[in-house]
Amino acid sequence: MSEIPEKDLPPGRHRVLREHLMREISNETSETNERPAPARRAAWRRPAFVAPAVAAVLSVAVVLGIAVTRDAQDRDRPRPATERHQGAAEVLERIAKAAEKRPGPKGVRDDQFVYVKSQDDYMEATHDDTCPVPRHDLTDREIWKSVDGKRWGLDRSDSGEYEEKINPKSMANDKPPSDYREVEALPTDPDAMYDWLHKGSNPRARSHEAAFRTATTILSDNIVPPEVSAALFRAVAKLPGVTVVKDAEDALGRGGVAIGRTDKDLKERTDWIFDEKTLEYLGERQVYAGGATSGRCGTTRPGDLLTSKAITERAVVDKAGEQP
């Protein structure tokens, strides 16, 4: 049994547990190819966050009877990947333009801290620490990160029940960058940002998957200046496989415009969710994108929620632990 109680599981374990689940799924998939499929077991997914299936609606016309029109058939036919990507690029351009107009922080001092408050939903360990399962309540999380990355920060969850200091030395080694000064210095030209996402963040991980992961990390727990945000969105629009996602919600159930990309390495799709009117970034979620599989950890199906996050507040404050 793990020495860390379920309730106090550090946020750093969330990714580890998700990757553990991915390994379990991969092992189960391999074993399935070698033996008869096991009996279906109860699913561990959290139904409240699984996007509902949407029934196709066909238009009909009455011409000496009832017939389905050719136009309706064309509308319901799945769009080619190139068309879906074009739609995502158009949405990201709208998001970039909105980001450019949004005011950024002014007069930020090196001795201050970036404050980000969120509500997270994630998988946690079972009592035997083997099969991750979804939580049934949201976790409040607050982080304070040194603006210049040289001062101790703070990571607090569950109203202080879990608290960890952020070592400035660990921030200095973070790739992609996690302090405001480094984020502020990122390219503002989309082409330069595209190159940086592939090479500048981690020269050993130059894949499109790694580039999208890097962009997600930058958006998640930072305050990103408007011109950097705009360049980031326009650079991501150039990545193959980026699509518009329907019916995506953050951890608070807030829906809107969503952009997603499937990571073939991790067998998961990450969705960015934006407010439908303001196009401001609301949060993200990860859903399983591999094949359906059953095994020791239950049944996993495409679309099952892995994690989700809802950003509720961002600000610059004078001290770690201080709220706006």
Image (cartoon, rainbow, N blue to C red):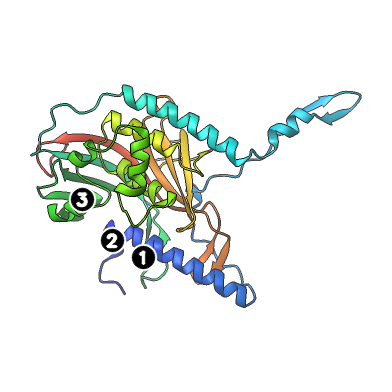
Q: Which residue is mark 2?
A: 9
Q: Nearer the viewer, residue 85 or 317?
A: 85
Circles 2 and 1, Cβ within 8 Å, touching? The answer is yes
Q: Residue placed farthest to the bottom in the image?
A: 35
Residue positioned 25% across, 71% down in the render: 3
Q: Nearer the viewer, residue 184 or 207?
A: 207
Disc 3/disc 1 C-alpha distance (Å): 19 Å
Q: Which residue is mark 3?
A: 156
Position in image of residue 242 (x %, y %): 49, 41
The crowd level at tag 3 (other Cα within 10 Å; few <14, some 14-19, many 20+) is: many
* Residue 59 in view: no
- Tell which circle, 3 or 1, labels the residue nearer the N-terminal end: 1
Circles 3 and 1, Cβ within 8 Å, touching? The answer is no
- Which numbered marker is on residue 125? 1
Residue positioned 46% across, 42% down in the render: 239
The secondary structure type at the circle numbered 1 is loop
The type of residue carrying mark 3 is Arg
- Which numbered marker is on residue 238? none
- Tell which circle, 2 or 1, labels the residue nearer the N-terminal end: 2
Position in image of residue 303 (x %, y %): 53, 51
Position in image of residue 74 (x %, y %): 72, 33
